[in-house]
């Protein structure tokens, strides 16, 4: 018998990777081999952008770095010796800066010593919170479409993912409150709420947040909020943290990050705050995922958080770039839902898909580099495969406008070839 090697163990190793791959649509239901794992659509699209020279409006990261003073503070911290493990909950200066930020912007009283935990980006805060609080038999409600890591972590926790639709309306993507009520049950452990919302750009209204709060109280569920775009809102849209609603601070874990607010997505400095007992539960898990991270970045972000100008200027510049891209997409015969926040716009391509005889948004995104020299991500990547929301958004793509104006103008000029002549 030939020796069993890793290369011959095609059906192995078994493990949670299979649950994660299935939950994110990377593995077909019957498949078991690592050879069957598809690349994420983000990796596929970024590779396509590189190989074709297309303008990449797929992945959402800024092409201009954050403030020079913040970068200089990190360099100084390295030179001053901030190069070993920082304290488990995060350095005191950063925890104090997070608490001061929450007080200044939202009037929230947060104890920096017991109610704040610094994490490796919002991603780790989300993963630790879900792993800490939900398990087999528990349900986690999210909005749909959803940020891709949610489905993966809910699967890792062994919990059940219950998505609730955000539906496109003339007033933007709006929460279907009746659907939320119908989705909640006594098994609901966590309501995971993302506002401002990636991928739709929706900023939930006070009424929508109040409906979520009411359901959470009725079902005695914890609310976990992903507020990484808290400062990136446009026009008169106002970001309201769910923890500021009456009675909600005691059952809410508020998560944010410096990546999006300060255009430093590679630094991965995030945080979570909430009642001490919940934060302790999250820390218990977090300390065995990464223990700590980003020693020299923590003091730099503590300094950045005292500066409200940089995020405000970024939001103003993003609002302008949003308008530019929305106009360009309309000229190319996409139908856009104008976003009120974030880095992203959702554009329905039904007219283009019909004209070119394509199947759906997935096929259009694969063909778009060749047709127009631009990359976008199909909305199917943010939906549960086969769900009513994924059907409704089957012809839609997400484009980012967190790119320099010249890059956006180049993409817009290229997209014009899609319009009927
Ligand atoms: C970018 C993003 C994150 C990840 O934030 P990090 O701080 O980079 O981990 C989480 N949630 C949403 C909605 C995002 O868009």
Image (cartoon, rainbow, N blue to C red):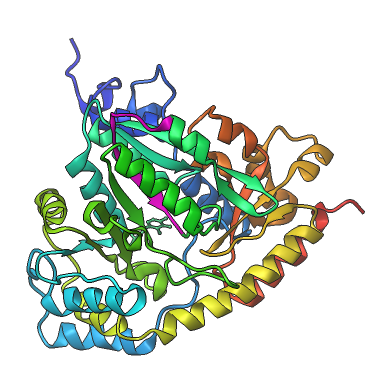
Above or below 333: residue 103: below
Q: Is residue 204 left or right of residue 356?
A: left
Residue 315 is one of the magenta-drawn residues: no
Q: Would you say residue 38 is visible in this rendering?
A: no
Foreground pick, 371 / 420: 420
Foreground pick, 138 / 292: 138
Residue drawn at (29%, 65%) of the image:
268
Above or below 214: residue 384: above
**Residue sitting farthest toward the top:** 1
Above or below 257: residue 418: above
Give the image location of residue 121, x and y in percent.
28, 61
Give the image location of residue 296, x and y in percent.
19, 77
Give the image location of residue 302, x and y in percent.
23, 80
Q: Would you say residue 232 is visible in this rendering?
A: yes
Q: Determine the image quadrant of residue 264.
A: bottom left
Quadrant location, the N terminus: top left
Q: Determine the image quadrant of residue 309.
A: bottom left
Which portion, as a residue range, is magenta?
183-195
């Amino acid at each position: 018998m030939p020796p069993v090697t890793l290369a011959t163990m095609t059906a192995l190793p078994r493990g949670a990777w299979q649950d994660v791959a299935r939950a994110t649509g990377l593995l077909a239901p019957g498949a078991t081999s690592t050879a069957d794992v598809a690349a994420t659509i983000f990796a596929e699209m970024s590779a396509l952008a590189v190989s074709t020279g297309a303008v990449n409006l797929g992945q959402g990261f800024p092409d201009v770095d954050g403030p020079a003073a913040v970068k200089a503070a990190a360099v100084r911290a390295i030179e001053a010796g901030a190069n070993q493990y920082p304290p488990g909950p995060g350095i005191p200066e950063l925890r104090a800066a997070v608490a001061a930020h929450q007080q200044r912007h939202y009037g929230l009283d947060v104890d920096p010593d017991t109610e704040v935990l610094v994490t490796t980006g919002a991603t780790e805060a989300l993963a630790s919170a879900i792993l800490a609080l939900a398990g087999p038999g528990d349900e986690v409600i999210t909005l749909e479409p959803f940020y891709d890591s949610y489905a993966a972590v809910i699967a890792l926790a062994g919990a059940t993912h219950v998505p609730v639709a955000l539906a496109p309306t003339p007033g933007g993507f709006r929460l279907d409150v009746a659907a939320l009520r119908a989705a909640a049950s006594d098994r609901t452990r966590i309501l995971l709420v993302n506002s401002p919302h990636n991928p739709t750009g929706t900023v939930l209204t006070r009424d929508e947040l109040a409906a979520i709060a009411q359901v959470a109280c009725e079902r005695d569920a914890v609310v976990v909020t992903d507020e990484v775009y808290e400062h990136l809102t446009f026009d008169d849209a106002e970001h309201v943290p769910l923890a500021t609603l009456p009675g909600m601070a005691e059952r809410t874990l508020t998560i944010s990050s410096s990546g999006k607010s300060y255009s430093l997505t590679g630094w991965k400095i995030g945080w979570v705050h909430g009642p001490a007992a919940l934060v302790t539960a999250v820390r218990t898990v977090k300390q065995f995922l990464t223990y700590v991270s980003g020693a020299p970045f923590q003091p730099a972000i503590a300094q950045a958080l005292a500066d409200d100008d940089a995020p405000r200027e970024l939001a103003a510049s993003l609002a302008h770039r949003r308008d530019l891209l929305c106009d360009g997409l309309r000229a190319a015969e996409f139908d856009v839902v104008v976003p009120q926040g974030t880095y992203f716009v959702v554009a329905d391509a039904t007219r283009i898909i019909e004209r070119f005889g394509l199947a759906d948004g997935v096929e259009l995104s694969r063909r778009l580099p060749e047709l127009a020299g631009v990359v976008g991500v199909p909305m199917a990547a943010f939906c549960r495969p086969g769900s009513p929301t994924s059907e409704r958004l089957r012809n839609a793509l997400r484009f980012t406008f967190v790119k320099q104006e010249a890059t956006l103008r180049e993409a817009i000029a290229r997209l014009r070839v899609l319009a009927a002549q």
